[in-house]
Image (spheres, rainbow, N blue to C red):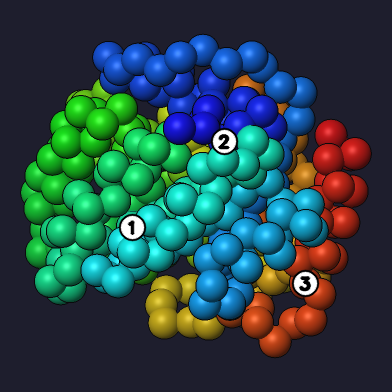
Amino acid sequence: MAKLFGSRRNRWGQALRNAAVAAGLWLAPVPAQSFTPLWVYDFDLGPIPEDNVDRVRALGFEGLVTRCSVTADVAKLERYARYVDPLDDFGMMAYVNYDFNNPDSPTVWRAILPWLARLEAPLWVIVKNAGNSVQVDTLLLEMARSSASYGVPVVLYPHWDTDIEDAQQAAERIATIGHANLHTSLHSCHEIRAGNQDDLPAVVSKHVHATRLVTIAGADSNAYSGPPPAPWDDAIRPLDRGAFDLTPFLRALETGGYDGPIVLHTWGLANDPNHLERSLRRYAQYRRRL
């Protein structure tokens, strides 16, 4: 099995190992690294996992994230994992859409645990359509306990218009459940949708200690559009589109000691040619500002 995200994945590796230690798990130490890698989702890429890896790796991304919502996605993740496993300069993760109305949800997350362990990746989970908060907490506690046996940390994925919409709600659930194998992630687009567009540095400062993953996207300066439903085309844009400045958000992450990967959000951008290349260039500009 390859080291966690290989030689250029070491900062995320150390962050994940810190999380594992807190959960009473053990993973081999890896050396520190001096930069923050940029990953990307496989939204709107092709149907062949190997081709998707080759494409974004050639562009300069250092990891890929795929979605696991239905049973067929398990085989897709397995195919990704087998291809990425020998690569020392590229990582792979998956996020799980746990939908209480989807009969596949109870089995999908369990089925991918061996592959997440092989990739040394977390169980990154969105929860939606629960009947109440007790159902959410029961599920997350079960995930935390089961994942710990594989050495896999659980990272909550706050997502607008779901049962956990922002980092504050994730923190409340983690505090209520009280299991050391639960962590959170921060998303510029979902924090904007939650009404926190003017307070992102404060959000980061409050929650960075529990944050294991971060996603970013370009956005309009007035992207918050009130309660759902609403389209995403103002809050998920290429990094070089929209007037929303991510510098304070990224600076707060750096100041707070965040050292995991940052994932470029690309939902709904299939009709914007060369947006991946443009976002990489814009990300490099952001990094030079910090």
Q: Comparing marks 2 and 3, which lies closer to the viewer?
A: 2
Q: Secondary structure at mark 1?
A: strand
Residue under label 2: 5
Disc 3 marks which amino acid?
Answer: His
Image quadrant where one finds the N terminus: top left
Q: Comparing marks 1 and 2, which lies closer to the viewer?
A: 2
Left or right: 159 with respect to 4? left
Residue 147 at x, y = what percent?
Answer: 24, 36
Image quadrant in which you'd find residue 33: top right
Left or right: 9 with respect to 70? right
Foreground pick, 236 / 95: 95
Image quadrant where one finds the C terminus: top right
Gap in Å between the C-alphas at discs 1 and 2?
19 Å
Gap in Å between the C-alphas at discs 2 and 3?
25 Å
Residue 221 at x, y = what percent?
Answer: 73, 66
Q: Secondary structure at mark 3?
A: helix
Residue under label 1: 96
Q: Earlier in the sequence, mark 2 or mark 3?
A: 2
State whether residue 211 appears in this view. Answer: no
Q: Residues within 10 Å of mark 2 (few under 14, many from 20)?
A: many
Foreground pick, 224 / 60: 60
Q: Residues within 10 Å of mark 3 (few under 14, many from 20)?
A: some
Q: Residues within 10 Å of mark 1 (few under 14, many from 20)?
A: many
Residue under label 3: 275
Q: Residue at x 84, y 65 (%)?
A: 278
Disc 2 marks which amino acid?
Answer: Phe
Q: Residue furthest bottom?
A: 271
Left or right: 94 with respect to 238? left
Q: Earlier in the sequence, mark 1 or mark 3?
A: 1
Image quadrant in which you'd find residue 280: bottom right
* As drawn, 213 above or below 189: above
